[in-house]
Amino acid sequence: MHRTLKQEATIPPASSLKAQQRKFDAFRKEFNTDRPHEALGMVDPVSVYRSSPREMPEHVGTYDYPAHYLVRRVSRCGTIRVFHNQIFVTQTLNEEYVGLEEVDDGLYDVYFCFYQIGRYELRANRMLDIISRVPTSQTRAELTPRVLPMSLE
């Protein structure tokens, strides 16, 4: 399916994003309504598709953090206030609640629901993201010089 999508909807690419979206929409319509699929007994997907009877909620409720957490709402600019300090967390969580759990004197693990997203140091008033503390492998970087450009032949 992905190879077919690429061949039919992206080669050559359209001249604008709007035109490219029209190509994708036309491909999706043909793929789902006009083409029979072997995996479906040579019928088109639209004839066997049934929407789910479950309804999605209008709004997902807030997460209940444990009672010992400090709970703060992330502002529209991605910050929270902790002990009169304003600290940037992330704009991804705008208007969501995060929980801070003290793990040492002035050191807090920051959570969104049950996912640890960082660590806050009160004295330095800085946020350490969890990614910077994850060890990374150097293997890919070490292999880079060995990669040769593809031949133009």
Image (cartoon, helix red, strand yellow):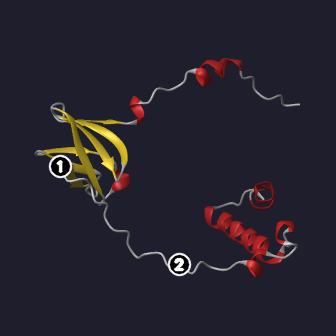
Going by the image, does 4 lie left or right of 118? right
- The answer to which image quadrant residue 96 occupies is bottom left
Placement of the C terminus among the 4 image quadrants: top right
Looking at the image, which is closer to me, 22 or 143? Answer: 143
Residue 150: image quadrant is top right
Residue 86 drawn above or below residue 4: above
Residue, x 76% and y 73% (percent of image)? 32
| Residue drawn where x is 67% and y is 63% of the image | 20
* Amino acid carrying mark 1 in the image: Arg
Of the image marks 2 and 1, the number of the one nearer the N terminus: 2
Decide: is 3 above or below 45.
above
- Label 1: how many Cα within 10 Å (few below 14, some 14–19, many 20+): few
Q: Amino acid under label 2?
A: Arg
Name the side, left or right, on which 30 lies relative to 121. right
Alpha-carbon span between mark 2 and mark 1: 38 Å
Binning the other alpha carbons within 10 Å of mark 2 as few (below 14), some (14 to 19) or many (20 upward) gives few
- The residue drawn where x is 32% and y is 47% is 111
Residue at the spot of label 2:
54
Q: Position of residue 53 (x, y in %)?
A: 57, 81
Residue bearing the label numbered 1: 81
Is disc 2 placed on a helix, strand or loop? loop
